[in-house]
């Protein structure tokens, strides 16, 4: 449902203008740019930029202007598919690793979606998709108490 609301906001200039107005109102109510950004699922920089434009140009600054630069390489359907891929086990894709990282995601996007993204962009994509990489538990967590004691005894001697 959240995606549908965001798509509705992006649908027209008027709805984006209203979206910017709501952000300005929240700033005036005392929320920080980071809080508003988190609430609207934007970057803090985006909110700061909208506030700056409003301070410099007034209400006219809240109207979207044509953007320079390249358009997105993918649409929301691909983003959702990537999000689902990240929830899958890596073994289902026959990757030898057991954790997603930027390098593996870059390879995966290249193979499955024919998208060329750098490692740093893939790390940002983890954040954008709110994917938190989980680290494996240490081997000692699975050992019995006697084996843990031996491990701990030996690891202290190494220091």
Image: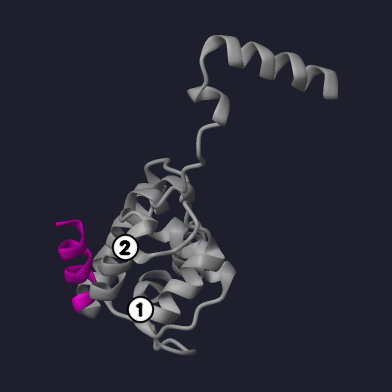
Q: Main secondary structure of the magenta part?
A: helix
Image quarter of the N terminus: bottom left
Q: Which residue is depicted at the point 35% across and 65% down?
A: 93
The residue at 33%/81% (across/down) is: 74
The number of discs equals 2
Q: Is residue 113 above or below residue 23?
A: below
What span is in magenta? 1-11
Q: Which residue is mark 2?
A: 85
Which SS class for mark 2? helix
Secondary element at tag 1: helix
Position of residue 150 measured from the top left corner of the image (x, y, whole percent): 68, 14
In the rendered view, tell whether residue 152 sits above or below residue 55.
Answer: above
In reply to whether residue 8 is colored magenta, the answer given is: yes
Q: What is the basis of the colouring in this image? A: one colour
- CA–CA distance between discs 1 and 2? 10 Å
Between 55 and 11, the one lying in front of the other is: 11
Kindly check if marks 1 and 2 are in contact, taking CB atoms under 8 A apart as contact: yes
Q: Residues within 10 Å of mark 1 (few under 14, many from 20)?
A: few
Q: Residue at x 41, y 60 (%)?
A: 128
Residue 112, disc: 1
Give how far across and how far down residue 36 sits, in percent.
39, 50
Tell me if residue 69 is in the magenta stretch. no
Q: Which mark is residue 8?
A: none
């Amino acid at each position: 449902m959240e995606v549908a609301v965001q798509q509705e906001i992006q649908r027209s200039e008027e709805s984006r203008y209203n979206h910017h107005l709501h952000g300005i109102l929240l700033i005036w109510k005392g929320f920080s740019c980071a809080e508003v950004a988190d609430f609207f699922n934007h970057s803090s920089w985006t909110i700061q930029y909208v506030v700056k434009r409003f301070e410099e140009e007034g209400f006219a600054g809240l109207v979207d202007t044509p953007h320079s630069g390249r358009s997105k390489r993918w649409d929301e359907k691909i983003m959702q598919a990537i999000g689902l891929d990240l929830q899958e086990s890596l073994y289902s894709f026959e990757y030898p690793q057991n954790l997603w990282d930027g390098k593996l995601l870059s390879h995966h996007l290249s193979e499955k979606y024919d998208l060329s993204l750098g490692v740093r962009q893939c790390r940002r994509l983890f954040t954008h998709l709110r994917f938190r990489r989980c680290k494996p538990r240490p081997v000692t967590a699975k050992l019995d108490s006697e084996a843990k004691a031996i491990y701990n005894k030996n690891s202290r001697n190494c220091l």
